[in-house]
Image (cartoon, rainbow, N blue to C red):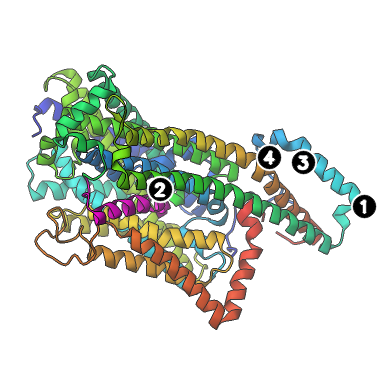
Amino acid sequence: MTFADENRYPPSESGWRVPRPEPRAYRDDAPRYASYGQAYASYGQAPRDEPYAHDAHRRSVDLAALRSAYRLLRRTSTLAALGSFVAYVVLSCYAPGLMGSRIAGELSLGMALGVLQLVVTFAAVFWYGRSAQRSVDPLARNVREQAVAVGRNTGVAR
Amino acid sequence: MNTFDSGTQATVLVLFTALVTVTLLMCVMAGPERDDLTNFYTGYRSLTPLKNGLAIAGDYISAATVLSTTGIIALAGYDGYVLAVSTALSLVLLMFLLAEPLRNAGRFTMGDVLARNMPGRSVRVAACVVTLSATLPFLVVQLSGAGSLLTFILNIPHVAGARTASIVIVGSLMIIYAALGGMRGTALIQMIKIVLLLGTSLVVAVLVLNRFDWNLGDVLRAAQHGSGAGPAYLQQGLQLGTSAVDRLDFVGLQITVVLGVACLPHITMRLYSAQDVPAVRRSMSWAVGTVTTFCLLVIIMGTGAAALVGSRYITATDPHGRTSVLMLSQVLGGAPTSAGSTILYSAVAGMVFITLLSSVAGMTLAAASSLAHDLFAHAARRGQAEPRTEMTVAAWTSVVVGIVAIGLATLVQNWDVGVLTTLAICMGASAVAPALTYSLFWRGFTRTGLLATLYGGAACALLLMVFSKAVSGTPSAVFPHADFDLFPMQSTGLVSIPFGYLAGWLGSRLDHRRRAAVGLQSRRLYEESEARLLAAAE
């Protein structure tokens, strides 16, 4: 759904959206994906002038790749976080003997696991950011560039 | 049991006045132009990830989190530790699962996310109803708590007039912040609040550990002794009990917190003001880091309160232990008249005060935005409202929401309404969470399914809550002498979350079966907007 007053980015003079400058995070991957783009360009004679169907096909392939990359990342991270927490709560409730066993002085296993979960959170968030940057961001950039190219080809006024 | 002289109270009052003046000034200066909608709702997406992350964390850590969680840790030990872990984890789940697609799909409010594939006024109205029913209880419980809290801090006699006055003062300030500041102004207050909160909590935690010469074993031993529960303090069961149903209730409560808290509209609303997907990711990293650090500090503070204050004194002041942070700071400061004790107590009181103010302001803004954007601009005016009109409406709805909340809070101030926090979280987990996950990730989701999820999940949570043990039948319930507790649990998530998801699934099935065209149209709209959802491609 679009809105009458939709105004997310400053519109460019030429009528379509200018591709926004990429954040620095992408820099590491830039060469690889530039060469991918060139390989693709030499495969078709002039990709910018290809018929629309070709673009649409490539677009859906890119989108599918992005979708599955996102899905994998989402499922792994969510299931790991939720799974470990549910296991912790269920163990706390139904194995109080195990969780109450002292591991060092007054510190019980349950308390240690709880604090450990909080500490591991920092590492998990860092890991998520790294993996998302590697697996998802380049694909998302492809899809965005495709959308800009299609918009140019079909002359959709934006 | 506040044993302070008038000097301390004067310091606290001066500090409160200074906090209010500074934040009001900043709020007005950062506030939006009169007819700039984007500025009012998202602050032009101009905040850096660090600032936005701090604002998300500030919105996330409400006064209820600070005071209740510390209290539960002080009184119930292990159950409170689990609650602190689940509070931190909820934001982590929001980051992993929803934050990035939400940023791409949303514009100003939750209604924008839900209605993007399903145009129509019914969706907007439902989104607004659920937003209100999730934020208003939270708002009322914190405002009514503000009354007894301020009278406790300032050591005013506990008469109804003083508490009502405190509620009205806090409520009016919150209205001013929300109406004048908009998203950017409240973001500034949230940042100030989270910095003060983290700083003060860190000092208190360090003082607690220092008192026991940094020996964790000693802290835990003293806490077991002070809580009067002995070894049970370090085992699950003190909060809700140890029978089979009580344990199930405990599991349900934790799962509800994990799924519900981070989905509440005033938190997801902050995500729309991130610049792009990497920015939202970095914002969330900062937010999660801040919240997790705070949860670790809360664990230390709560245990310290049990060890140094003791549960007998804590429950004598408040049966839920919500004043335990303040009492801990009194004990830690040393002699009641020394400068150290005055400074520490004033700092903690100021932290509680600014936390209270900023969290109610954030919730008012979320409720008012939904009323102005979903109900007025899109449902009543069908998206044809002038930005200027919508801004004015948004400012006035903040006033209306604020006044309604003040009225309700004054009405219920003599009851024990802590259950409203649980209700808000249950609403988030059983109506908002299913609606958002289905809408973002399931292409077969239809309008009937969405309405069934929103209304069904919310109604189920509300109905079960009314007949739960938290409302009647137990000594700590809202109506301790009445007896209509047909649902033997304190929180409803264990039943209402599956119900919300099931209602959405059944509703969508029904649409596909009965009106195939509608189902196909929803699917087509989802696929058309998928590039925008996943990659922010226009």
Q: Amino acid at mark 4?
A: Glu
Q: Which mark is residue A33?
A: 3
Cα–Cα gap, marks 4 and 1: 27 Å
Which residue is denoted by mark 4 in the rendering?
A: A22
For image coordinates 56% across by 41% down, the residue present is B279
Mark 4 belongs to chain? A
Compare residues A154 and B181 and report the one nearer the observer.
Answer: A154
* Of the image marks 1 and 2, the number of the one nearer the N terminus: 1
Which residue is denoted by mark 2 in the rendering?
A: A86
Secondary structure beneath label 2: helix
Cα–Cα gap, marks 3 and 1: 19 Å
Left of B510 or right of it: where is A92? left
Which residue is denoted by mark 1 in the rendering?
A: A45
Q: Mark yes or no: residue A145 visible.
A: yes
Q: Which is more foreground, mark 1 or mark 2? A: 2
Q: Amino acid at mark 1?
A: Gln
